[in-house]
Image: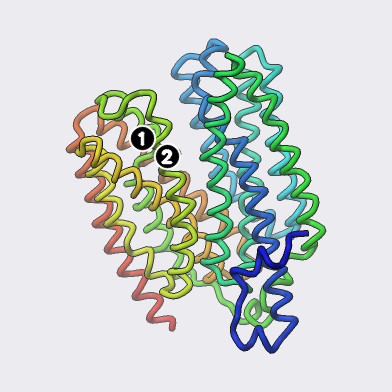
């Protein structure tokens, strides 16, 4: 059991809480649920990001070509995001929150099986299976979180979870570097990833006992009167698409680093870790701001995207350093506010589907945008900059439409 003193830092201290013991107990229980889900995500991200950090070189040792590496990566990411539409819809129809949650995280156990692989074809099956697991677990995890954050505050609850989750992408790649230094091969690292997976499994078993019916955390009155903002979500989805399409992925950024020599080759992973640290920190801050200011906080994304692109593609190392800090901040803000917004503006009975759709938009737009940026980069970085600026100008227009819809509905 997690000590109440540890969890109390985020507990509501309003008179309502002080006068209503049931309200306080529910708040404490919800925070414990969010904390445990964060621990599960931490160890899950530890395993998946440790693997992703060496996936390309590992497949190369098995005889895969560059095209095969690109194909496996693309299929994996498409599976991780595109299939969420199906898993989210299934979740809403069957309401089997913990079953889909467990299956999705259970597929992470395909990673240690890479220890036994001797062909890139079998490795590809295991790697893509893990990404399918992400598509299965993400809508159920986010839906469960949406119920718990109704008690703690949407932004703050999702911020806590994201902050814990981002520890995994920081330490996972470092762990693999350590294992490579110690053993000289990738297979040993994959085998030792069984340890965090077992810890994750134990936490998963405990969290199910804590909240067998997570939907009970959300106010019955609110779930009955809440309506779907379809006229809001269409421009919101378009806005998200434009933002992510103009947001360079790290493989493109790291390619730019290596090609230009702005950053020493051995220091490239450190910039990614720096960005993930900033993501973890900003998730908590942006969550609090969202609870106070609402969806208006997402209006800063176009400005940040332009500043990030300029610093990364035109700055020297100092400007690049600033760009990567802002890159990590942008990821933390997008992930926290996206999930909080869906929870606030979607009907409880359709939340899994909405999470699935918007996450699919998120992943698809980032994939297409990164491909477009890569093509334009081969022509000129000026083409990349114009691409980003035009998309963000369009995003501002869509954002104005979003705010208009909200004011009209209020």
Q: How many marks?
A: 2
Position of residue 142 measured from the top left corner of the image (x, y, whole percent): 61, 57
Q: Secondary structure at mark 1?
A: helix
The structure residue drawn at horizontal position 19% and vertical position 44%, both measured from the top left corner, is 386
Position of residue 63 measured from the top left corner of the image (x, y, whole percent): 54, 10
Considering every residue shown, the one lying at the far right of the view is 209
Q: Is residue 256 left or right of residue 276?
A: left
Position of residue 301 measured from the top left corner of the image (x, y, whole percent): 33, 57
Q: Is residue 255 left or right of residue 137?
A: left
Considering every residue shown, the one lying at the far front of the view is 5
Q: Which mark is residue 371?
A: 1
Q: Is residue 245 left or right of residue 117?
A: left
Is the C terminus in the top left, top right, bottom left or bottom right quadrant? bottom left
The structure residue drawn at horizontal position 27% and vertical position 39%, both measured from the top left corner, is 320
Query: Where 293 sits versus 356, above or below?
Result: below
Query: Where 333 sits versus 41, above or below?
Result: below
Q: Which mark is residue 259?
A: none
- Badges 2 and 1: C-beta atoms under 8 Å apart? yes
Q: Secondary structure at mark 2?
A: helix
Position of residue 225 measured from the top left corner of the image (x, y, whole percent): 61, 82
Q: Which mark is residue 367?
A: 2
Is the N terminus in the top left, top right, bottom left or bottom right quadrant? bottom right
Label 1: how many residues lie within 10 Å, few (<14), some (14-19) or many (20+)? some
């Amino acid at each position: 059991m997690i000590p109440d003193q540890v969890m109390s830092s985020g507990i509501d201290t309003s008179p309502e809480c002080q006068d209503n013991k049931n309200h306080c107990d529910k708040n404490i229980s919800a925070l414990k649920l969010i904390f445990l889900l964060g621990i599960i995500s931490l160890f899950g991200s530890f395993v998946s990001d440790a693997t992703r950090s060496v996936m390309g070189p590992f497949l190369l040792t098995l005889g895969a070509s560059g095209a095969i590496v690109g194909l496996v990566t693309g299929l994996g990411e498409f599976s991780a995001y595109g299939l969420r539409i199906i898993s989210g819809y299934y979740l809403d129809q069957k309401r089997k929150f913990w079953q889909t949650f467990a299956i999705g995280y259970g597929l992470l156990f395909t990673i240690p099986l890479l220890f036994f692989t001797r062909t890139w074809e079998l490795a590809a099956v295991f790697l893509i299976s893990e990404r399918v697991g992400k598509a299965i677990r993400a809508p159920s995890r986010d839906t469960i979180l949406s119920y718990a954050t109704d008690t703690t505050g949407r932004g703050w609850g999702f911020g806590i979870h994201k902050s814990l989750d981002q520890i995994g992408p920081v330490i996972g790649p470092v762990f693999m570097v350590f294992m490579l230094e110690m053993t000289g091969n990738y297979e040993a690292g994959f085998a030792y990833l069984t340890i965090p997976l077992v810890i994750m499994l134990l936490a998963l078993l405990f969290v199910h006992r804590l909240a067998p019916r997570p939907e009970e955390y959300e106010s019955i009155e609110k779930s009955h009167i809440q309506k779907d903002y379809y006229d809001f979500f269409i421009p919101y989805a378009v806005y998200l698409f434009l933002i992510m399409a103009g947001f360079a992925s790290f493989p493109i950024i790291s390619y730019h680093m290596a090609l230009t020599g702005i950053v020493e080759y051995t220091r490239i992973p450190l910039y990614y870790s720096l960005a993930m640290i900033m993501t973890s920190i900003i998730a908590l801050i942006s969550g609090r701001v969202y609870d106070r200011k609402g969806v208006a906080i997402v209006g800063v994304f176009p400005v940040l995207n332009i500043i990030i692109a300029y610093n990364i593609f035109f700055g020297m190392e100092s400007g690049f350093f600033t760009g990567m800090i802002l890159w990590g901040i942008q990821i933390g803000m997008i992930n926290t506010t996206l999930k909080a917004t869906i929870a606030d503006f979607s009907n409880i009975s359709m939340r899994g589907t909405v999470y699935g759709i918007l996450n699919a938009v998120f992943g698809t737009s980032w994939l297409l945008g990164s491909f477009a940026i890569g093509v334009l980069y081969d022509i000129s970085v000026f083409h990349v900059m114009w691409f980003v600026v035009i998309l963000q100008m369009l995003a501002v227009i869509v954002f104005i439409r979003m705010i208009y819809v909200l004011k009209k509905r209020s």
